[in-house]
Image (cartoon, rainbow, N blue to C red):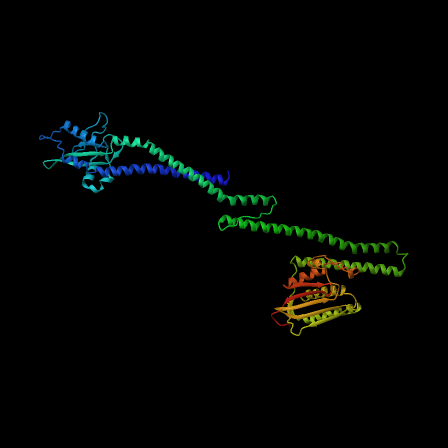
Amino acid sequence: MTLRARLTLTLLLLFLAVGATLYVGIARGAGLYFEEVHYKLNRDVAEHIAKTLEPFDEVGEIDKQALSGLFMDVMTINPSLEVYLIDTDGEVLAYDAPPGHVKRESIDLAPLRAALANPGEAGDLRGTDPRSLERDKPFSAAELRSHGELQGYLYVILGGEAHEAVAASLRESNRLRGLLLFLLGSVVLSAVVGAVCIAFLVRPLRRLRDSMVGFQEGERPSGLEVGADEVGELSSTFQAMADRIAEQLEELRQNDQRRREFVANVSHDLRTPTGAIQGYLETLTLRWERLDPGEREQFLQIALRQAERLGKLVDQLFELTRIEAREFTPRLEVFSIGELVQDVVAKFQAGAAKKSIRLHATIGYDVPPVRADIGLLERVLDNLLDNAIRYTQPGGTVRVELQQAAGGVGLSVADSGPGIPDEDVPRLFDRFYRVERPTSEKVRGTGLGLAITKRIVELHRGTIEVESSSDAGTTFSVHLAASTSEAS
């Protein structure tokens, strides 16, 4: 059973219970109301009758025939009354009723005496009904005295058998049935209105359920109603959760794609030097005697260079893996980054001069020291300068600038090379990604240098950016935080 059906059924049962309670309460309340009205209208009737009543003769005998006629007249005028003559011991002496209707020969005098002693509280008292062995009824009572002596009591039941018969017929009347039908119609109408309201309130939950089912089947939810109530908050939370899961799934898909590319690139880059080494060594082994010393040395030199390339690639892979796995902890120390830049530039001067490339360094006088791993920062400078010199044509220029920047140090390495295409810039720091440029045919690298450079800079909580154009070359900019202590 759906939530909507359960809520509708619960509401219907609730209205039925309320309707039944109202019906019983109205019927009971109406009876008590008319009983109280009837009592208040007739509470002094016994006293008025007693003033004109002389039930005892001179010798103390009861004129039952006269009393019966009087009682009949009173009950004819007001059929809801039943009149009895009671002696001082509670015995019923006289009444007017068909044979067999009076079932008690005496009554309990305690309620009667309490009513006579406290007339204001008589409405809350009920006395013995001589015509019933089980129930009590409201009554009116008065003392009967002769020559100042108490001779008995006049006991009047308010709401006798005639009154009950009329009340019973009223309970079966059309008006009461009309009231019952009105209550039933009100319950049904309320249930219908409640069912419509429940359907309106449950609609966001149904949409949320449909979105969850669709999300389970792979559909990304959208267009959920977000309101200020609890259902709206639940929809908003589910929407945020679904968006987050979708983003994570997309990230996993991209990571899996990158992993596949990484494995393919590693396999390709490892296969090339390994195949070259294997080929030249097999040639040397099989044709050693037929090769002259110059060819032997040439083949060995080629195999050695390929082995060095293979070792460099393995080292870079190991280094990149350690940095990305957060297993590498830099050895931080405070030092002058200006001195480091001078040393690294001096190390590349010979290589740049060999290619007829002008290498210049500009270091600001106010550059603050940094707190970093000097070996890792040297690796950053090595990678940037190596790339700049490698891809700069003979006669070009490579400039290194170190200046104080906002909150730290700014380092830039700019070359006058052919630049990098715009579509390649976003992927420049990806592993194994290489830009195919006219000057790169004989200087292909491993594609890991810039990836390692970026990870090292991020490890020092710095940033690295690249700008490139076909007419102005390429510029790498690194920003590092300055140390709060002086260099030693």
Which residue is at a point 64% across and 66% down the rendered structure image?
A: 480
Give the quadrant of residue 37: top left
Give the quadrant of residue 392: bottom right
* Nearest the eye: 376 or 398: 398
* Nearest the eye: 88 or 130: 130
**x%, y% of residue 59?**
9, 30
* Nearest the eye: 399 or 339: 399
Give the quadrant of residue 159: top left
Residue 132 visible in the shown view: no
Which residue is at a point 70% across and 51% down the rendered structure image?
A: 260
Rendered-image quadrant of the C terminus: bottom right
**x%, y% of residue 121?**
22, 42
Residue closest to the far top: 99
Which residue is at a point 46% across and 38% down the rendered structure image?
A: 9
Left/right of residue 218 with respect to residue 132 in the rendered view: right
Residue 48 visible in the shown view: yes
Quick check: 230 above or below 122?
A: below
The number of callouts visible is 0
Quick check: 226 above or below 360?
A: above
Quick check: 169 above or below 15?
A: above
* Nearest the eye: 316 or 164: 164
**x%, y% of residue 353?**
78, 69
**x%, y% of residue 255?**
66, 52
